[in-house]
Every structure is written in C-alpha cells, then in structure tokens.
Image: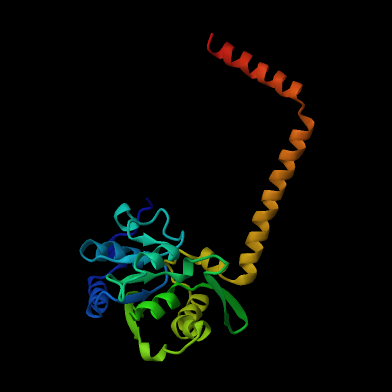
Amino acid sequence: MMRLPSLSKIAGLGWRRQLSQSINNLGTNSLVLGASTSRIVVFLEEYAKSNDCRIIAGSGFEGIISTHLSSKLRSPARLSAEWKFHAAVPTPIFVFQDQLVGNGPSYFEWQQGESVSLMSYIDFLLFQRHQPHILRIGEDKNGGLHTEQIRASDLHNLDPQGFYQHVYGAMFDDLNAKPPRDWLASTLFEQKQKHIYQRVIRDELRLIECILREQRLTSLHDSDQNMESFLCEVQQQYSQLHS
C-alpha cells in the first residue's frame, strides 16, 4: 500500500473534527460529495474507525487505502442495489464522482458550458430514492477541508442536467481551474470528458485489433507439423535442464 503523509502534516485535528461533526449532525441519511485527495483518504481512514459508511469510487484509491477502508468501497451498481428497499440509507455515503469513468445506461452526458462530461447517475438515483441530506466538501484557504450543505429544496423537480449543475458545477469548475495539490484522480477526471473517453476507448480497441491480427497471422503460418517440431524442441531442452 502506498504510504500516505503523516496525519499531522496534511490533516489538522480541527478541520477533521469539524468535518466529522458536520456529517454526523445530519444523521446517517446523508450523501457527501468530494474530490479524491489524500487528505480525504486520511480523514476517511480515521472516520471509518468509529463510524460506518459507504464509499462510491472508481480506481483512484487503488494502492492508497487500507484493507479496513477498502471494505467500505462500493461500485455505483452495487450500492444502488444494497439498500434498494430502504426508505433512508443507514450510513453516510461518500461519492467521488471525479473517478467514476464509464459510459452506457448508468451514465449520461452532462453539458457544462462547451464541455461534455460523462456522469454516473448514482447521485441523482440516491437523491430521488432516499432524499438524503447532501454535503459538498471544499478546501479552505489554510489547506483544510470544510463542508457546505446543499438545500434539498433547491434540487426538487430538477432533471439530471439541472441536478448535476447545481451539485457539481462549482466543484468541477474548481477542479479544472485549480486542481488540489494532493489530487489522486486527475487522469480519471480527464477521462470523464466525452472526447477524451472516446479517444481512450479507440486506442484500446486498436490495441485489441493488433493483438488479434498478430494471433491470426501466427496461426496461418504455423502448420501442425511446425507446432509438433517446436513442442519436441521444447521437450528436449526441458529434459536437458533436468538431466
């Protein structure tokens, strides 16, 4: 596991306590949105020791979080099914949209200015289903973190475009203009842009095509006899090594 900076260096006791209090004061039925920074990881490691929670994230925390905290990780699909029939969620849910990359029915194209981001529907789904309190985590001028509550009344009757603009507009503007110094998901965040995601997928498909073409050419040039001769040679070398 990658070694994180010491708690005293990146996380003052004051803002960590305030962050915990802000979350716990709203009760368990809460949705907490933030950017994937090492400060958040340190906070979550501490918070999860005495509070149950769930964390919706992609691959941005790989090699960073402990085994204890990784047990709290959920994919959007798994989390949406976990408490499907609950009126309210029984633990706070931390969502890190900046590292949720994908396409298909569980994602939609969010238009923000001239850019198009591929956003997971999970926040919108959880809000519509459970009506949780929503907290957004921001960075203060001293490098600590604080919360800002988003009023549920401002989100009612909004379609996904309006909902995500209200919830993520300011956060994504900040990530683009001034990325956090300890941001762990910058590459993944880039891939949320539709044109970059499509380019990555094209590159991966091209690689798969090259591998398949190479395999086909190899199969065409190798007769059964050639394969048998090669096998005999390998067996002889194996015997020599163990004689």
| Residue 37 visible somewhere in the drawing | no
Q: Horizontal and vertical percent for residue 102?
A: 55, 65
- Residue 17 falls in image quadrant: bottom left
Q: Is residue 214 left or right of residue 22?
A: right
Q: Residue lying farthest front?
A: 85
Residue 66, compared with residue 221, is above or below; it is below
Q: Residue lying farthest left?
A: 50
Q: Horizontal and vertical percent for residue 36?
A: 42, 67
Residue 172, compared with residue 60, is above or below; it is below
- Residue 155 falls in image quadrant: bottom left
- Residue 152 falls in image quadrant: bottom left
Q: Which residue is painted at 53% across and 12% down in the image? A: 242
Q: Residue lying farthest right?
A: 221
Which colour assignment does the render follow?
A: rainbow
The residue lying toward the viewer, choosing from 227 and 12, is 227
Q: Could you tell me which quadrant the C terminus lies in?
A: top right
Q: Is residue 223 left or right of residue 153?
A: right
| Residue 156 visible somewhere in the drawing | yes
Q: Is residue 228 left or right of residue 118?
A: right
The residue lying toward the viewer, choosing from 6 and 124, is 124
Q: Which residue is painted at 29% across and 66% down in the image? A: 53
Q: Horizontal and vertical percent for residue 52?
A: 25, 65
Q: Is residue 221 left or right of residue 74?
A: right
The residue lying toward the viewer, choosing from 178 and 27, is 27
How many numbered tags mark residues here? 0
Q: Which residue is painted at 48% across and 81% down in the image? A: 164
Q: Horizontal and vertical percent for residue 88?
A: 30, 76
Residue 210, compared with residue 20, is above or below; it is above
